Structures are given as structure tokens and as C-alpha cells.
Amino acid sequence: MTVAIKNLKLALPPGGDRAYAVDDVSFELSAGKILCVVGESGSGKSMCAHALMGLLPETVTPESGEIRFEGKNVLALSPTEWLALRGRDIAMVFQEPMTALNPLMRIGDQIAEMFEAHGLLTPKERRQKALALIREVGLPDPERAVRAYPHQLSGGQRQRAMIAMALALEPAVLVADEPTTALDVTTQAQILKLIRDLQRRRNMAVMFITHDFGVVAEIADRVVVLQHGKVVEQGTADDVLLRAQHPYTRALLAAVPTLQPPQRVSLLDRSKAVEVIGLGKTYVSGGGWFRSERRVQAAKEVSFDIFRGETLGLVGESGSGKSSVARLVMRLIEPDAGTVRIGDVDLTKIGGKALREQRRRIQMVFQDPFASLNPRRKVGHIITDGPIAHGVDPAAARKRAGELLSLVGLNAGAMERFPHEFSGGQRQRIGIARALALDPEILVADEAVSALDVSVQAQVLDLLEDLKARLGLSMLFITHDLRVAAQICDRIAVMQHGTIVELKSASLLFAAPEHAYTRELLSAVPGQTSSSKAA
Amino acid sequence: MISFIAQRIAKAIIVLLALVVLNFFLIRMAPGDPAVVMAGEAGAGDQLFIVQLREKFGLDQPLPVQLFLYVKGILSLDLGFSFRQQMPVSTLILQRLPATLLLTGTAFAISLAFGILFGALAARFAGTWADTAITVAALIFYATPLFWVALMAILLFSVAMDWLPSFGYETVGAGYTGLTHVFDVAAHLILPATTIGLFFMATYARMTRASMLEVGRLDFVKTARAKGLSDTVIQRRHVLRNALLPVVTLAGLQAGTLVGGAVLTETVFAWPGIGRLMYEALLQRDYNLLLGVFVVCSAMVLAFNLITDLVYRSVDPRIEFAA
Amino acid sequence: MRQVWRVLLRNPGGMIGIAILIVAVTVALIGPLLFPTSPWRMVQRPFLPPFTLAGFPLGTDALGRDVMAGIIYGARVSLLVGLISTLASLAVGIPLGAVAGYFGGRIDDALMRFTEFFQTVPSFALAIVLVAIMQPSIVSIVSAIAIVSWPPVARLVRGEVLSLRTREYVQAAVVTGQTNWWIIWREILPNALSPVIVLASLMVATAILLESSLSFLGLGDPNLMSWGYMVGAGRTVIRQAWWITVFPGIAILVSVLALNLIGEGLNDALNPRLAKGGR
Amino acid sequence: EGPKPGGVVNAVIQPEPPSLMMGLVQNGPTQMVAGNIYEGLLRYSPKLDPLPGLAETWSVSEDGRVYTFKLVKGVTWHDGKPFTSADVLFSIEFLKQTHARARGNLVQLDKVEAPDESTVVFTLKQPFGPFIGIFEVGSLPMIPKHIYEGTNFKTNPANNTPVGTGPFMFKEWQKGSFIRLVKNPNYHVKGKPNIDEIYWNVIPDAAARSVAYETGKVDVLPGGSVENFDVPRLSKLKNTCVTGAGWEFFSPHSWLWLNNRSGPTANKKFRQALMFAIDRNMAKDVVWNGLGKVATGPSGSAIKYYTSAVPKYDYDPAKAKALLKEAGYNGEKVRMLPLPYGETWQRWAEMVRQNLQDVGINVEMIATDVPGWNQKVSEWDYDIAFTYLYQYGDPALGVGRNYVSSQIAKGSPFNNVEGYSNSEIDKLFADGAVAFPDSAREEIYAKAQKILVEDVPVAWMLELQFPTITRCSVKNLITTGIGVNDGFRDAWIEK
Ligand SMILES: Nc1ncnc2c1ncn2[C@@H]1O[C@H](COP(=O)(O)OP(=O)(O)OP(=O)(O)O)[C@@H](O)[C@H]1O
Ligand SMILES: Nc1ncnc2c1ncn2[C@@H]1O[C@H](COP(=O)(O)OP(=O)(O)OP(=O)(O)O)[C@@H](O)[C@H]1O
Ligand SMILES: [Mg+2]
Ligand SMILES: [Mg+2]
């Protein structure tokens, strides 16, 4: 046993979500073992990690309990004693590789700083060690990577650099706070493997925070489940994943979608709701008198149809052009080539007032439930603005808005409140109500559930499925999560580098992927073995 | 890089030309005719005198012709002839420019160095009495009218204590050379430079502090702490460098305007600079001189903006010179 | 908004600022009722030192005018100049910045060149020239201050709009078929306002300083008693009558300070990035 | 205890002169500095009697038409070339082209001849009483023929390095900082000058100027270089001497231009009301610290033929109100332009505004800078405007120009700006200039003064006095009616 957290109680400042960020939590980390801490957003996962690093926010204070590391209670350490401990004995990898590295410092220097902080080695040796570490975590072209600035690396590469840094002093404990959440499935798979390998090789104790049960199944030896700052369940991975005792754990597990698409009837004989033919879009940035420009081809020759009542999924890794296609279909950006046809109207050929009028036929649900609602407008206005702009009488629009709110599972009183008074899942429902207010024929959902916790995600997916059936909507559903796609889509298109490489019915795609990229994508989905065990 | 600079210079030239045209009309809208002003100064003015003057200055030509001649001159780097001083404008400006550059350069250097230092200290010890003291001092200097500081400084340091000279650029007639001359000029420089400097020092201190506190909340600072780096190192190496970027931008923008904005200080301290030259030219409707000063000041601003951009780009690797 | 007040009132600096401002505004509003004689009136012997004669607590100036009355009437002028010129520069800067940021492309380019152009001319020098050209009067002073101070507003608003334009709720408004103007007005501007309010409070302060600097150079409105005028008029006699300059100088300092404190408090209250730090 | 040679003087000059070439530029600061470089044929005592300058002796013919000057022998220009009568003839031609006031002074000149190297003879068309008063250095400076002949005067590069015959030579000019003059070792008056160097310091801010004196950085504050409010304080400093002398030749006289053409000021009763409404004694005491004199009329008391036998306008608001009523004034707005020459003038205008408001006149103060003031006044775009003008010792030179109708012309702020037109006055001034002898002139001018004071074409305020403040150790600085402008010739420093 390397670290033992005993009855830890962290007090939140008054006015917070609750009195204690972490309430009477106890668990242990042992050398050579990975402990996964899971729980929904705000359950106190990060607070545990920060307490272990001595990096709690000033407003959060440990009230009781202790954290024992090699016999000492680290909570009682003086600031200087902490300096010696951090990095050398306990190291940490953060969630967001974009912001966790200093943008103005070279990667090599940031790694070398690890030695410098503890007064080890000469500058030259530090540089050599940094290079060796970069090699060890598998960054391509290590000589270049040492000299690179963070912005010159991709997200996965940055996360590798972070890991190299954390490993520099061969710490006994590695704390990883959602280190793969910001990454693609394929990259995520690589990073998980890397952590697993390194942990084995160095016999580290790892505290791995995640909210993704797939990831848990992939790497956990032991699991701790947190809810509202309390441990509701802990045990070995198998115990928790296969024989969960606590209803909360069970609910969480049940909400994890499986990779097996349900059987669906083919809708290909229906009429076409949307026809997309040969869409192309190249972003040109920069450029000027003397400057050459930067071009990104985000979509080329993208063609697909969506039939009435059908859900077409669009999957692919980050940057493959999914959002661009959605925005092209919505006419939020101008295409360079191609047409988008809704019924007999060619959306790409019209503009101004005519376009505004046609817009009601195709509506959108956005990704971020926080950013997609104007924080300064009441929910009622948010929903009725659209219909009123299309000439609906305000009173009628309000009445309809009330109905829609109850349709998405909120009560009509919500109309008088502001968005910040709702939870993420509720906001997403408001966003859906807004889209439905115009009685559209087609709904475009760009990562509509990606920002939500699994349990909430499941509810919203159910809602969409239900509405679609009831209102006879067609849907373009964009996601990077293949499990979600499997659950909701009739057919799935796989995008890579701006082109659709494969498009077929969901069951066929998962059963018999043809394109190499599709196969790679499928195999990268974490937790396939265990979750099938769990299912 | 070269093409970047070339592009910026091309843009700057366009801005300058537009500026010349606008200022040309703006200044000529002012009531008051330079010929009448000069006649007034001469203590007599019969019609002949005024007509002669107008002819001499080309003021009898139609406005568009005057503008055309002026722009033509500018394009060949000729700023024209000062009506009143009977000298080429460029000569007059070049006589005064060094003094202004010395004054504003010193003020700028002092304010930037100390502003950042104090701002960093305040941020480092945020919440302590040191922070409060610096913040309050900065706020007060920020809120005090410049001319007021100047008056008080003169009263205190020149009149009451007799430590520092209250006016001028050097001790007139002392005939100092070499190092004594340098010290003499430095002594004259202290009051005006601090007067200008205090305000900007306050600005930079406040900005550095705010920026550092903001950067201090960013994730990579947490990473640095997780490494076991001491607070001092984190503040210096990680926080400060990142926090300086906006300060550098602001400072660059201000450095240019400082040159033309030193009117008040130069007047109060009898500093023979270009700000005062501008004000006097305005009061004498010495069009060419006034326009000339404006052109030079604006060119200076553009130059500083360019320098700032270059500095910024060399400090921040995220911005690359478009290849 | 209520929350903003709460944060502002919890901020000691902001509290002090608001308290001072309330006093200043009260003085400006009801002071003239209590001191009905014109501040220009010669009421006592010249150069009466302060605290010597009841009724003239702050002494008299070179012509025997009551310094106290001057400060009370000056509050009105100085605050009004600060406020109106700030409103005027907002009226120019906000629409310009909003249009540039929202429509982007060539429009943005053109408008930003225009803005840069104004930023290239040294602002104090430009203000002097403008006032001299239009002849010093309250109107010309306010316009000059507005003309030199709108560019930062435009830039700020443009920056905000530029980032807000890509927000999902703005896109949502587009897909529900709203017009551009409606989107700018209802969706974007209300959300861009917080930093503008902060900037505006600082601009009022700067405007008061600018007015006093212009007055100092003799470019004030000779029919209106402002603090800047008093300092400018008193400075030549500062050696024999410090109080003529010191009291209005303090008035300027204190009100500018108050506005800055409020600005800083507002910044803490309105700036979401900082607010998040508390969560 | 006589004059001692040596020493350096620091004086203040404000504003910085545009040029020191006195033939081309005649503004106040130029005269003050360059008056020590150039010389005229004569100088004038505080009583305005002529004194020898470059002319040793002079005589006037019986009929008052021929003036003969004998020049000092052995005078050289600063560059070593001899000064002769040819230079005098050349200077006359030069100044007729460039010097507006000289041109005016010389209208009665028929011809000028040089019978020999050191004699110059001026012949007038008719007797011109003031003629003997026009030879001061600022009015008729001698210009070196060998430098300017055949060149374009205005662009001659020598304009930047003026060459005269005076006691001091131009040495150096740091624009914006100082002008340095050094002793002329070959000066034609033996034993003069005593002082080795003069630095004229350019200090644009009035308060800074008085601090510069106070801290011992400058020794001489010529009249007008500090605000009046500072004079009492500075005069109390130790080793400080103050004198109002040295302005007799110029006799600055201040008044309010009143627009006689339109508005309430076109009404004589209204104008008289103004005279009663304004408390000039208080202005003298408060604004001018008791310096100067209340003006009684168009002529200063130091000017020839001055008379005090004119109608009196003492401060009497009640009378002013009555007159206003008579004039039928009903509260129309009256625009007043202060003179933009610093705080003293601003305060004065504020005081007058107060006086006028007290009797019920609706005054609006218009702020302008110097060019704006010049323009508004010379374009007659004002109701009331402050001014002061030099009188040059003789009513024909400095008084008549402001009241005769031939001097009504837009474009100059120094002629009959008020637009007063009275044929009787026109005739009196025309006759006065050429009447002969003096007693005849005296009678004419007395009559003119009486009529003018009755009509109040302008509102006379004060005979101004600009005190010169010096260290007491600077001796003998002001010896003539021209004051500092040619004063350093005789000055010396006590050690
Ligand atoms: N700096 C802070 N100051 C005060 N309260 C905080 C702070 N950071 C987090 N909290 C609160 O502490 C509680 C636990 O937060 P924590 O960050 O540990 O959640 P989490 O499980 O990591 O969630 P997520 O999955 O969203 O990262 C939450 O109620 C949160 O609002
Ligand atoms: N406005 C833009 N200007 C320039 N390039 C852009 C712009 N928007 C997107 N891109 C680029 O186009 C490519 C496709 O972007 P897009 O947002 O469509 O990808 P995505 O598949 O939605 O990715 P993610 O899963 O990360 O949302 C990316 O390389 C992206 O950097
Ligand atoms: Mg977390
Ligand atoms: Mg996307």
C-alpha cells in the first residue's frame, strides 16, 4: 500500500454546490495497481486528486481525515516539504493537454524543469534525459519534439509529453485526471496502452480518474465510485463492473450504450428528406498582399441522402470534417461546391429572406448545453424567438413553447427562468425544444450528447429517439462516440479527412467493417471485452 | 519575416497618407490665418504685409493645389517649410526629436521596468499589505492629473529641496562636456521623466498584476506546481512570461503615442521637445510645421506598433510569420 | 444584475468607489441649490486662505471667488463632461465595433483601418488640435474627447462580437431564421456589454482627466467652472495660494480614483473568467 | 564703485522668437533679443528724448523737413566690415519692403541721401512731428548691405546668423532651449559692453519661469514674463529689484474693442454705460497688483500731448444701469473675447464679465487662442474684445491708427478695428501729424482726445506696466525708454 486516504472531508466555501466536495472518503493506492475513480461530473473526483497533490484550491480546505503516503500524513506537510514531494514522489497528468502545457516554453525545457525543480543533474544531462523520456512515451521524431512548442504538437502528442514529464522522476504514484477525455478514440486507446505499459514497467501506483466505464473496463485493477462526494462503492474491477451492488453504480453501468446496434427496419424505400450531393468546403485562412494562405479541405465530394424518419450517423475522429458538413447542410457556411436539397428546394441557391424562410424546415441541436443558450434571455424567449420571426403570433408561440417544454420533460414554468438555472441535461432539452418549435422536417444534431454524463446522455438519447418517432423527423446525428452511434442511427457514414469512406446500415457497419479506417476506429473503442462481459 | 515587415510598412504608408490628407483639412478648418498671426506678432499689419506673407506661404493658392503640393512633398520626404520659423520643417523636427525621444524613452523604460516589477510583486504577494500598498499607490498615480504631479514635483524637489533642476534640458551656459554633461542632462531628465513615467508605471503595474493573477489560474501553472517548482520560480518563469504578452502589446501601443503626448510635461518643464513644438505650431497656425509633427508622430506610432508586433512574435511562438 | 451589485458591494474598493461617486453626484445635483451664488462671483478678498473664515472653508482664489462654490459647481461640469463624452464615444464605438465584428471580411477590414487610423494619431495632441479648431466650448471639448476615445471601444466590442459570433446560441438564432440586426441587437450586444461597462467606467475617469488637461492648457470652456479650469487658473499662483489648485486637484484625483475603483470592482463582478475562479 | 567688466547673465525670453533677423521679424521677443545685436540710429531716454545711437549727432532744419545725421565713425559690423551711410540707405529700402510699421512711419519721406560715408540726410514731403521718434532699433534697425544686397532677403541663409553692429553678437541658438549672445569686443562705445555672455532661456510655462528665477537659474525676468500675481512674491525675494521703467517708448495701453457697427455696442450710450460699469481700479489692484494706471482716454499719460482734461468715467454701476435703460438695451447676448495671453488676462476678463453682469449685461465669454483672436478681431467678428497696443511715444504713430476711418480695413487687428468713423477726428489726426511746431500739435490732439473720450469708440482700461524683475546685482540694465530691448549695452554685474 503506497497511499491511503482515510475519512477525507474537504469543505467547500459557503454558497457552493454542497457543504463538502468530498465527504468521508477512504481508499488506497497500491504499487503496481491502477485505481480508477469514476463518478459523474461534480462528484469530487478531481478534488481527491488535488488533495493528494497538495494542490487544493485556496477556498477548499481539508476538514478532517488524512492522506498517508509512506507513513506520513501529507495533509500536515509544510509548503516546502510539499515541494520535495510533488513531482518526485507523486506526479500528475491533467485532462486538458491543450492548456496544461506552458505555451511559451519548449517541450524539452518543460520536461527538464522537472529535474531542475528538485535540483537534480546538470543542464546537459537534463536535456538528454528529456530526450530519452520523449522516446519512451513514443513521440515521433524525438529530436524535433524536444525543441517543439506545445502548439506544434497534436493533442495526443501533447498528452504523451505530459506523461513523459510526470514520469521523469520515476514517482511512486501517478495521478491522472481524465487524461484521455479530450482525445479521439484512436488516440485514447494509444494513451491508455501507454499508461498501462509504463505503470507495469515501473511498478507505479496509479490513480486514474475517468467518467467513462469503457476506459475503466480497459485498465482498472480496482474501482472507486463517487457520488456527491461520497464513496458509494469500491472493489476490484470485476466486482464493480460485473457485480455492482449500489443502485447508483448499476444505473451508471446500465446507461453505458453497447456497441451492438439494435435491429432496425430499413427505411430506404421512403422518400428523401435531404439530398446532399458533392459538397465541398475548403477553409482559407490568412492571406493578404504578401502572405501566403493556409488551406484546410474540410469536406470534399460529400454526398448522402437522408430518408424520411431516418437517422443518419456521421462518425470520425476529431478534425475529420463532421461539423463542417453539418454547417454546410445548415447553410451556416457557404459551400464551395455541391448542393443541399430539401424536398424541391436547393438551399445552396437561395439567400436572404428566402433562405430565412426555408430555414424552419431544418433545425439544429448543438453540442454545448452551456454555450448554445443565450445566458441573457429567458427560456420562453429562446424558444419563441424563432416562430415569432417566422410570423407566428406571440401568444400562440408561447402556448406552443409550453407544450414543447412538457414534451421534452420540463414543466411550463421553465419559460420564465434563465438558462443558468438549469442543469446540463435540462439545457439540452431546452435546445431540443427550441429546434422543434419551428416544426422542422429535419434535425441536425452535432455532438448533441457528448458533453453530458452517461446517465443524462442516455435520457437525452431516449428523448430524441422518442420525438423522432412521434414527429416523423429525419435526423443527421453527428458523434465521435461509436457506442452512441450504434444505439441511435439507422445508417452510419464514416468520415476521414473530409471524405466519407464508408456508408452503410449500422448493423452492417459494426458486423462487417470494410474500410481500414473504420476497422481501426472500431477496435479503438475502449472496454469492448469487459463491457460485453458486463452487458 | 521580411515580407511581413514590407507588408506592414506598405500599410503604414497608406495610413500616413490618409492621415496627411485628413490633417491637412482639419488644420485648415481652424479659425486663424498664419499670415494674420504673424502680422499680429510683428505689431503691425497693413494689407500689403499680409498679402506678401500669404503669397510667400502659398496660401493664396486654392486648397486642392496646396494639398497636392504638400502630398507631393511628403512623397519625396519633404515636409515643407515652416512659415513662422523660416526653416525647413524637417530641420526643426530633427532638432527637437532627440530631446523628446530621450525624455519619453527614459520615461517609458522606467515605467515599464518598475511597473512590471511592482505589478509582479503585487501579484506574487496578492492579498498581503505589500499588494495593497502597491495597488493603492498605482491607483492614485493612475488617477492623478499629470500636470498636477509635475507642479508638485517642481515645488518639492526644485523649490523646497533644491535637489533637481526644474526646467530645461541642460544647465544653460555651464559648458559641460563628457561625463559631467551626461550627468547634467540626467539630472534635468529626472523630474519630467518621472512625471510621465508615474502614470504609465501605474498602468503597467496594474496590468501586470491583473494579467499575472489571471495567468496564475491557468492550467499550466497547476502543472508547474505539480512538478514541485517553488512559487517564485513558477511566478517568474511561467506566470510572468505569459502575463507580459498583453502588457507588451499595450506598451507598444503607448510608446508611439507618448512621443506626441508629452505636450504638457514638455511645457511645464521647458523641455525642448517635439510635443511643445507641436503646440506652439498650433498656436501659430504654422500649418506645415504642425502637419510635419503629426506626420512624424504618427510614423513613430506605426513604427512602434511594428516593433511591438515583432517583439510579440518573437516572444510568443504561437504566432508565426506567415511563410 | 443583482448579483453584480452583490459582488461589487463585497469588493471593498468598489464599495469605496461607489460611496465616493454617490457623494460626488449628490454634490453635483443638489450642491448648487445650497450654494445659489454663482461660483464666478467675487465674494471675498482675493487669496483668502482656507479654514480662516466661516462660510469660505476652502478660501478664495485670485479674484476673491469662493473655492468651495467652484468645487461644487465644478463637480457638475466635470462629471457631465466625463459622462457625456463617454456616452458619445460609446455611441460611435459600439455600432462600429459590432458591425465590423459581425460582418467581418471587407467591412471589418475597412472599419478597422479606419479605427487604426485614429489610434495612430497621438490622442492628446489630436484632442488639443480639435478643441483649438472648434474653439474651446463644452461642445467642442466633449466632441474632442469622444473622437479620441472611441477607438478602444470599437476594438473591444469588435473582439467580443468576433468571439460571440461563433457561439452556438448565435448560430441557433441564425438557423431559426433571425435577421442580422436582430441577432446583433438581441443575441450579441447584451452579452458583449460587461467588458464595455468596465471600460466605460474607466473612460469616464480618463475623460475627466483629459478635460482637466485641456483646461490646464487654457483650452477649457471659459463659461463653465470645472475642476480642470480651477487647477489651470490656480497653478500660476500656486506658490502664494496652494489651496486654489490643491482642492480641485484633490477633487479630480478622488473622483477619478472612485471611478477606477468602480471599474475594477465591476471587472471582478462582470468578468466571467475571474468569476469562474471563485467556483 | 563703477561698472565692472565680466559676468554672464541668464534672462528669460517668452515666447521663443521665430527668428532674430530684425529686419524681417519684429515681434516682441525678437526685438528683445535682437535689440542687443542690431542698432538703430537713435535711442530714446525714458522721457523719449533722442539719444545717440549709431548717429553721433543730428539736426533738423528750420522748416522741419530736413533731418541730417552724423554717424559714429569707425563702427564695424560683427563680421568686421565697416558700417557706413550706404548701409543706412540700404536699410531704408530693405525695411520699406519688409517692415510694415517702418513703411508707415516713412510715408512722409521724400528722399534720403548720403553726401559722405558718415552723413545721412532725410528730406520729408512735409513736416512730420513724430519723425525724430522713428529711429529706435526695433522701428528702424540697420541692416548690413554687404550681406543682403542683391539677395532674396527672406531666404538669405544669413538670417539664421544675424549680423549687426550692436554690443552683442549672435553665438548659438538651441531651439526650444536657449539663445546665446556674446560680447562684441569691437563695439564702438569704449568700455562697453561689460557683460561677457547673455543666455536667453526659453521657458514656456509662466509658473516654471518664476521658479527658474526663484531657484537662481535666471537673473532677469523682462516685463510680462511672469504672471502679475507672482510679482509681489518674487519682489520680496532677497537680492531682487523690480522696476516698471523701460516701457516708456512703447507705453502699452489696454482697452476693449467695442464693435461700433452692430449690436448693442453700436450705441454710444451703451458704450458709455460700459465705461461706468467696469471697475478699473479694482482690476488694477487685484489683477495687476496695483501696477499701471487707470487710462483716461486714447493716449497714455507718457505720450506726447496727453491731456487729462477729458470727461471722466468713474466706477458707477447705477449710472451704467441708467444709461443702459436709456440705450434701450434689453438683454441681448454680448460676446466678449478675452486676450489669450495668459492667466492675468483671463482673470481680468472674468472680472469684467462679472462687472457687466452686475449691471445686467448678458455676457458670453468666447474662448480663443491667439490666432483665433487675431482672426475674429480682424474680421470684426466680436462685440467686446480685450487688447493692448504700443503707442510709440507719439499720437501720430501709435494712437491715431485706431480711430481714423482710413484705417478701417478687414484683416488687421491693429487698425481701426472697432469701426469708429468720425470725419472730425479724421481731420484732427491728419492735421496733427504734419502740424508744426509742437504747440500747434498739442492743441489739435487735446481736442481729439476730448471728442474721443466723449464718444467712447473703445473702452479704455489701463496704462499697463510690465515690471522687470532682476537680481539687484545686475546694474544699469534699464537706462532708456526702450528698456531691456537695448539694455545690455550699459548693464554690468556687481560681484
Ligand atoms: N476551485 C473551487 N472552488 C470551490 N468549489 C469548487 C472548486 N472546484 C470545484 N469545486 C466544487 O467541488 C465539487 C467537486 O468538484 P470536482 O472538480 O472534484 O468534480 P469532478 O468529479 O472532478 O467533476 P468533473 O467530472 O466535471 O471534472 C463540485 O461541487 C465543484 O463545484
Ligand atoms: N472556420 C474555420 N476556418 C479554418 N479552418 C477550419 C474552420 N473550421 C474548421 N476548420 C478545420 O477544418 C477541419 C474540419 O473541422 P470540423 O470542425 O468540421 O471537424 P470535426 O470533425 O467536427 O471535428 P471535432 O470532432 O473535433 O468537432 C479541421 O482541420 C479544422 O481545423
Ligand atoms: Mg474533474
Ligand atoms: Mg465538430
Image (tube, rainbow, N blue to C red):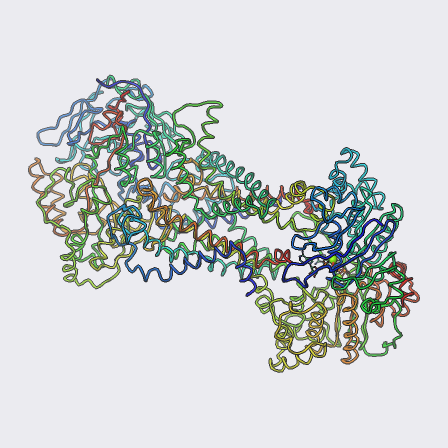
In the figure, is residue B1 to the left or right of C196? right
Q: For the N terminus of chain D, which image quadrant?
A: top left
Percent across and percent down for residue C198 are 53, 57
Q: Residue at x 16, y 62 (%)?
A: D325
Percent across and percent down for residue D226 are 30, 38
In the figure, is residue A209 to the left or right of D270? right
Is there any visible trace of residue D146 in the rendered image?
Answer: yes
In this rendering, the answer to whether C182 lies above or below B144 is below
Percent across and percent down for residue A485 are 83, 67
Query: C139 or B156: nearer the eye?
Result: B156
Label count reads 0
* Image-quarter location of ligand 4: bottom right
In this rendering, the answer to whether A57 lies above or below D150 is below
Percent across and percent down for residue C38 are 29, 57
Query: B152 or B103: nearer the eye?
Result: B152
Is there any visible trace of residue A256 in the rendered image?
Answer: no
Image quadrant of residue D238? top left
In the figure, is residue A522 to the left or right of C140? right
Q: For the C terminus of chain D, which image quadrant?
A: top left
Query: A298 or A526: nearer the eye?
Result: A526
In the figure, is residue A197 to the left or right of A150? right
